[in-house]
Amino acid sequence: MDGEDKSVTPPPPTDPAPQVRTLRCTGCGAPVAVRGLQQTEAVVCGACGAALDLTDEGLRVLHVFASQVKHEPLVPLGARGRLRGETFEVIGYLRRAITVEGVDYEWDEYLLFNPYKGFRWLTEYNGHWNYVKTVTHPPSPQTPDKHPTVEYLGQKFRCFQRAEARVTYALGEFYWKVAAGETCQVTDYVAPPLVLSQEKTDREVTWSVGEYMEPAAVWQAFGLRTPVPPRLGVAPNQVSPYIEQASKILKLLACLLLAAVGIQALTVLLSQNALVFEQNFLFTQADGEKAKVTEVFEVNGRPSNLVIRSEAPVDNNWLYLNLALINEQTGEAYDFGREIGYYHGRDSDGAWSEGRRTDTAVLPSVPPGRYYLRIEPDSQAAEMSYKVRVYRDVPRWTFFWVTVALIGLLMLFYWSRRRNFEYRRWQESDYPMRSLASSSDEE
């Protein structure tokens, strides 16, 4: 209307107050609260374990949960919490179990109710929580193979486990006539953070979809003050933290690799890689004086490495060079020895070879000046030629390849942790991974 004040907005809707009616248990006379209105068909008395039929005026006892152990729900009946933007109240608590290879595995299920949204479920196993709702359109099965899959809303789900689930304990109210020992065939398909579950009985087939919830989020939603139970193992649809970290880790490693490439490229561009000395020599056993002294050569510029490369045509033989780089002006000497050897042959395993006909020695930081080499060769050969070259300011690749190797190790470490997480997940399923390197159940 024209006269309306459009600046005034209506107050936000408030959550509906819970409607609770109290009945007397026909089994023991204890008060029993009913919160699910007309949609509730059965309620289990917390005092005596009797399941009462709410569709019967006399509250007929359907079954008695004669459990010797009283299970205390982590989220108490009547607790109200806000999940996915809607307020739900916990009205029922189930404990169900499966038996695999003679071992019982139990989990908890909490029935949630909202008068406008209907029913939802919270499930908990080993500290892992899921928010579950029934789906109206079942998924499409894909071509059966060694690992069956289904497709739901364009997403592929892998079969995780098939088992017969049975009710072992109940408390509160339910939208069916719950009974201890009732069973159904459950098949779970996972695509983290989602899980599709099929529950099949003689009467019907029901599909539901669950989404993994962080335990702290459940505690916050319901305002619980008790300590959050720790998580054990890996849940079928738990999101791998390594997948969430993948983009950050890959960006970091890519930056490290680009930095290493940039630094190495700059080093290569700024290095002179200059040949400052080259000479051919001849070794003979007949030489009376084996030591040889070269001509003086200039090493200019800033302090840098000197690379001495020697080569000889050794063949099933060796040549040892006792070398000294001597500064003509100061007399400072750098003494080092190098051996060149190459051997080859054939044995029962085939042809073999070892050694090289070249050798490289690096003096890391040599100041500029005038230098010469003193060479004392030795060999068992009667005669052998060899060549010696000296280069200054040669770009080194050692640190670059060490950096690349470290990046590779980090990638391998990340991959192994990620694969180990998936390995632990699928070890609990009907389709366990054969090994950490297996790719059949890739996440």
Image: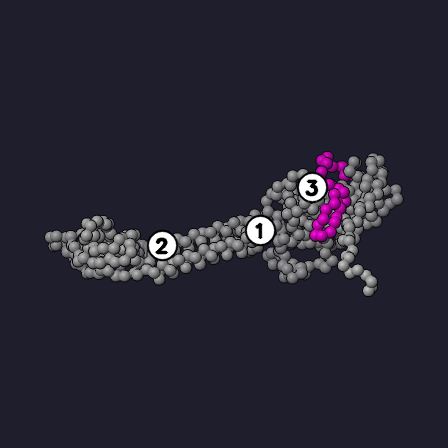
Q: Nearer the viewer, mark 2 or mark 1?
A: 2
Give the crowd class for mark 3: few <14, some 14-19, many >=20 residues within 10 Å.
some
Q: Is 382 placed left or right of 204 in the picture?
A: left
Q: Residue furthest right?
A: 57
Q: Which residue is mark 1?
A: 240
x then y, percent, for residue 315: 23, 58
Residue drawn 14% across the image and 56% down it: 284
Q: Label 3 amino acid?
A: Leu
Q: Label 1 amino acid?
A: Ser
Q: Label 2 amino acid?
A: Thr
Q: Which residue is mark 3?
A: 224
Q: Which residue is mark 2?
A: 398
Residue drawn 51% across the image and 54% down it: 249
Quick one: label 2 or label 1, which is nearer the N terminus?
1
Q: Is 36 placed left or right of 248 in the picture?
A: right
Q: Quadrant of residue 276?
A: bottom left
Report, in whole angstroms, how far the alpha carbon at label 2 lies from the one at label 1: 36 Å
The answer, for residue 398, to whether it is visible in the render is yes
Highlighted range, magenta: 64-92
The image quadrant where one finds the C terminus is: bottom right
In the rendered view, tell whether residue 278 sits above or below residue 45. below
Report, in whole angstroms, how far the alpha carbon at label 3 lies from the one at label 2: 58 Å
Q: Out of 226 and 12, give the one closest to the viewer.
A: 12
The image quadrant where one finds the N terminus is: bottom right
Residue drawn 35% across the image and 62% down it: 269
Quick one: label 1 or label 3, which is nearer the N terminus?
3
Question: Is label 1 in a helix, a strand or a loop?
Answer: loop
